[in-house]
Image (cartoon, coloured by chain):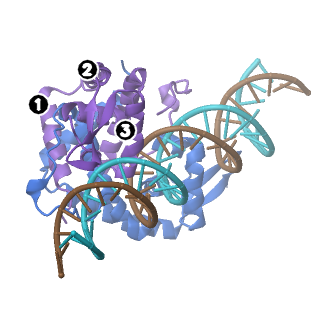
Chain colours: A blue, B purple, C brown, D cyan
Amino acid sequence: MKKPAPKRSSPSDVAHVSDATLRNFLGYHMKRAFNVIQSDLTQTLKPFDLRMLTYTALVLIVDNPGLRQSQLAEAMDIERPNLVVIIDELERRELIVRDRVPTDRRAYALKATLAGRQLYDRAVAAVTAHEERLLTGLDQDTRAIVIAAMKIVERSFGEG
Amino acid sequence: MKKPAPKRSSPSDVAHVSDATLRNFLGYHMKRAFNVIQSDLTQTLKPFDLRMLTYTALVLIVDNPGLRQSQLAEAMDIERPNLVVIIDELERRELIVRDRVPTDRRAYALKATLAGRQLYDRAVAAVTAHEERLLTGLDQDTRAIVIAAMKIVERSFGEG
DNA sequence: AATCATTGTTATACTTCATATCTATTTAGC
DNA sequence: GCTAAATAGATATGAAGTATAACAATGATT
């Protein structure tokens, strides 16, 4: 999150730092673009008292009732210990419940409450609007190409 | 950074967690793809004892000799206090020096040493190879479209 | 039954990132 | 010129994200 307003008087006295070398890398462009998205997303989720991780967890639980914590951690690509505090928070706010799994008393079946599903609805709508706002400069073809490219990079995991 | 090897016996018993809602968002695809890139980049930089931030700082200092710390912090989109430790590390390893600016005794002019420039050469080559490895599935047209899209998103900062 | 694996948890540590505050300078206002 | 405000860098501190080790309870394997 950057400062709300830069204190430069005019665009002309902006420091002319060359990042030409880094601009050769797609990863650099992705990081800078994602920083913008994440900043805006954080602001978008703030009214709902959600962070990116609690939002992601809530969405996945609503969409996959009965999910185990270990499955959710794997889906979110985080370690199990780190998920515990996220689930703790969602449970404390009564957005989800930890139901015991009868067939495996070690595990919890995660389910959203009515309040959780209602917050989900509002948050997903807000994030949809946030994306529409940030991506107005990209036509549908471009968005499709970018998404396809991201999937290819994502699946290139473990090769090489 | 994920586990080196999943302990699933076969792809068929992978948990079938639906992230269909999140897949509607380009930001979600970007985050997942960038996680893969960042993991691989971290491994790529490890032999040089560099992290993404120290690598970025080194590249910008080599490319912009005489840079001030505040300019570098702004270019890297981080706060000045956080840059201090990064510069400390690069200076301690004698990859850069903090020269005093004669016209402004508050500021430092950052410059790379010979060792810094040599490490830069090797690290940039390694990162170039890392990108080529991860992006083999993307043809040049696609890469250009993605980069242009990232620039548009990056510049959409502050609108709305 | 004994061993091993898994689920969730606690404790811990490291990295990133943000803020407030301090100093020493420099710049601006009077 | 002299005081006040702004700036450069540094220190201290805290929140958040991420990773590992180790544990208790339970389940699976042999």
For the residue marked with disc 2, what is the amino acid? Asp
Q: Report which residue position mark 1 lands on.
A: B141
Structural distance between the alpha carbons of marks 3 and 2: 19 Å
Q: Name the quadrant of the C terminus of chain A.
A: top left
Indicate the chain on which mark 2 is placed: B
Is label 1 in contact with label 2 (beta carbons under 8 Å)? no
In the image, residue B8 lies at what x, y percent? Answer: 55, 27
Q: Name the quadrant of the N terminus of chain A.
A: bottom left
Marks 3/2 same chain: yes
On residue A154, which mark appears? none
In the image, D6 versus A149, the foreground residue is D6
Query: Does the image show residue B51?
Result: no
Q: Secondary structure at mark 1?
A: helix
Structural distance between the alpha carbons of marks 1 and 3: 37 Å
Q: Secondary structure at mark 2?
A: helix
Indicate the chain on which mark 3 is placed: B
Q: Nearer the viewer, mark 3 or mark 2?
A: 3
As displayed, is residue D28 above or below residue C7?
Answer: above
In the image, residue A50 lies at what x, y percent? Answer: 44, 63
Q: Which residue is located at x 55 percent, y 41 percent?
A: A79
Q: Which residue is located at x 56 percent, y 47 percent?
A: A82
Q: Quadrant of residue B33?
A: top left
